[in-house]
Image (cartoon, helix red, strand yellow):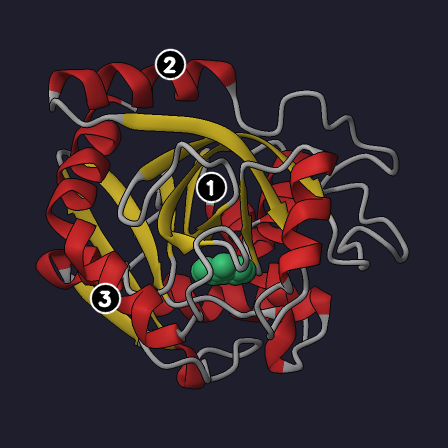
Amino acid sequence: MLIEDTVNYIKGKTNNFNPEVALILGSGLGEFADEYCDIVLKYADIPGFEASTVKGHKGQLVFAKIAGKRVVMMQGRFHYYEGHSIQRVVYPVKVFKKLGVKNLIVTNAAGGINEKFKASDLMLITDHINFMHVNPLIGPNDDDLGPRFPDMTEVYKKDLQELALSVAKKLDIDLKKGVYMALSGPNYETPSETKMLKILGADAVGMSTVPEAMVANYCGIKVLGISCISNSAAGITGEVLSHQEVIEAANAVKGKFKNLLFEIIKNI
Ligand code: HPA
């Protein structure tokens, strides 16, 4: 499968929509796209994509004009823990680059490690730690996309962070800030692992986002990351974790989250 085949299929189905902003919607956060369904393409129908297997993820690309911007949204993403290769996980980002996307907003549900965080807080990702033990940039380099040894000093662009913080302030949303650490999953952490992640510098932990953000940065797409803190990481409160709880926390925050995303897209 050549990336051009995917790109040509999408261009054909969307009348050359040429999105400028891409949005990846994490667990329980996909509803944002429901309000703006101009054109919908199911992953199962897109060459090079595959059906999403996670509950709470619809598995489709949604194209829409939002606040005057041409936006492509992923309602559900590909996770490494589903058994997809890490290349498959980041494939949509490479397709977005070829479609002309300049800014990527990545979202996820994450466990809070910073003890000041509580369920349903939103956290601006200031940096990440790749602890997935896999790297999507390994392999022959496509020099058309990016350099062999990409810099990762500022994956989450400072100007986009400032934009998100100022929009949050205007909307009276207490947007936290922190470092997101990605593990492969699919299990949640043990309490001892949570302690270790904290020592290593994590404020939140999850199972996604980092591969997509790395590849976007590599190919010159500006990245903004927002986590919905769905629970305290294992061992912090002593409560047992479940996917249901993650979806419920995302649901509780969706009004705030939608407003924040809309205003960010408008001002990006
Ligand atoms: N750990 C890892 N991933 C997660 C969590 C968590 O506590 N919550 C939501 N995604």
What residue is at 38 percent from the left and 59 percent from the top?
A: 26
Q: Is residue 38 above or below residue 150?
A: below
Which of the 4 quarters of the picture holds residue 183? bottom right
What residue is at 36 percent from the left and 28 percent from the top?
A: 176
Left or right: 125, with 147 as reference point: left
Q: Mark 2 vs ligand 1: CB under 8 Å? A: no
- Sooner in the amino-acid sequence: mark 1 or mark 2: 1
For the C terminus, give its image quadrant: top left
- Residue bearing mark 2: 162
What residue is at 15 percent from the left and 41 percent from the top?
A: 256
Q: Are marks 2 and 3 in contact (CB under 8 Å)?
A: no
What residue is at 9 percent from the left and 58 percent from the top?
A: 35
What is the x, y in percent for residue 47? 52, 79
Q: Is residue 44 above or below residue 252?
A: below
**Nearest-to-viewer mark from 2 and 3:** 3
- Residue bearing mark 3: 248
What is the x, y in percent for residue 100? 47, 41
Q: Is residue 14 visible?
A: no
Left or right: 128, with 52 as reference point: right
Label 2: which secondary element: helix
**Crowd around label 3: few <14 · some 14–19 · many ≥20 (10 Å):** some
